[in-house]
Each structure stands twice: as C-alpha cells, then as structure tokens.
Image (cartoon, rainbow, N blue to C red):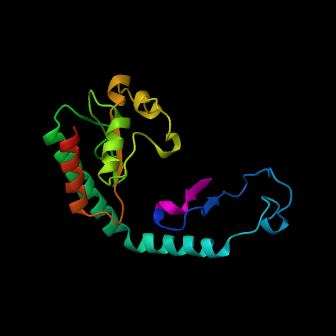
Amino acid sequence: MLSLSGHKLYAPKGVGALYVREGIDLYKFLDGGHQEKDKRAGTENVAEIVALGKACQLAEKNMGEYIYKLKEMRDFFFEQVKNKFPQCQINGSLEQRLPGNCNVCFPNTDSGELLLKLDAEGICASGGSACSSGNANPSHVLTAIGVPQELAQGALRITFGDFNTMKEVEYLIEKLENIL
C-alpha cells in the first residue's frame, strides 16, 4: 500500500490518496459507502481529487528542476551551519535524504526556545516531525539513531520547498547566528 497527503506536493490540504495493491483486503470501519466499493462511507471530494491529480502531473513534469533547487538550498544551509556552528550535529546521511530536508542539533540549546525566536523572525521550523508537534520530549527518531537526549533537545528541522529562495536560506542563517 501507499498513502500520500496532497499538501506535500501543493494540492489542497485534506486530500490524499491510498494505493492498495490487488489482493490486499481492507476492512471498512464505517457503514455505508456503496459508491466507494463498500470501503468507506462518505462522498468523494471531486474538486480536490482533480487538484491532487493536477499537482501530481506538475510534480512529475518539474521533478528534476525541483530536486536540484532544493538540494542546492539544503547543501548551502548545511555548509553555512557547519562553518558558523562547528559544534552542531547534522542528523542523518548527507546523501540519502529528501532534497529539501534539514535536521540539525545545536548543543546546549532548547529547541522550544529556538523555535519561538525563529517564529518571531517570521521563520517556520520544527523541533521534530509534524506527527509529534506539541510533544516536549526529544524526537524518538533522533534518539533511535543514537543522538544523545541532551543533544536532541536542541534539534531543529527545516524543510525547504518550491516557493523558498536562496535569499530566505541566507536570512535563516543570519537569524540563527543572532539567536544562537
């Protein structure tokens, strides 16, 4: 099976897709849904489904250019962070990662405080995955890959997207320098 959230590729928030390989039997948890092959109740949101399809077409068409742009911003961010904060730790492989994904830990830093200060500068960031927002504990993923808990307390996750610019990455670095 494969599930995807439309907002991850600029489709409307709330639309998604589920691909189920033939031979996998799903059980419904709500009655009704004959129009959905008895798999779920409710009516399809056709407009958002069409928007998701269009977003997928655009993503496929622009994928190479998009990946190049995101990698360029990500690599510049990591280079600047390592130069300006040599004590920081970049989490995960530098090669085997999503092109716009940056995760770094700053020692002796509270990511909650860092995030508030970045937010005051107009910068959206996270201390962990979106699934665990609001959780004060360090990321379970970081601790699972061996990042010590005291270092994971200073985690910062930045994700660059299609509408970000290199100028915004430079602004982020400048604000991180001021804050840290």
Which residue is pictured at 33% across the width and 62% down the height? 67
At 52% from the left edge and 75% from the top edge, which residue is drawn? Answer: 54
Question: Within the image, what quadrant is residue 110 found in?
Answer: top left
Near-viewer residue (157 or 146): 157
Left or right: 16 with respect to 104?
Answer: right
How many discs mark residues in the rendered view?
0
User: Residue 147's x, y, as percent?
Assistant: 35, 27
Quarter of the rendering containing residue 170: bottom left
On the image, the x and y values in percent for residue 165 come to 26, 64
The image position of residue 129, as x and y in percent, is: 46, 43
Q: Residue at x 60, y 64 (%)?
A: 15
Q: What stretch is highlighted in magenta?
A: 1-8
Residue closest to the eye, 3 or 86: 86
Image position of 57 with respect to 140: above or below:
below
- Establish if 179 lies above or below 174: above
Q: Which residue lies furthest to the front in this view?
A: 120
* Residue 27 as seen in the image, left or right of residue 141: right
Identity of the residue drawn at 16% across and 34% down: 86
Q: Could one spot residue 174 in this view of the protein? A: yes
> Whole-percent x and y of residue 150?
34, 23
> Per the image, is 140 magenta?
no
Quarter of the image for residue 177 reads top left
Quadrant in which the C terminus is drawn: top left
- Whether residue 92 is visible, yes or no, is no
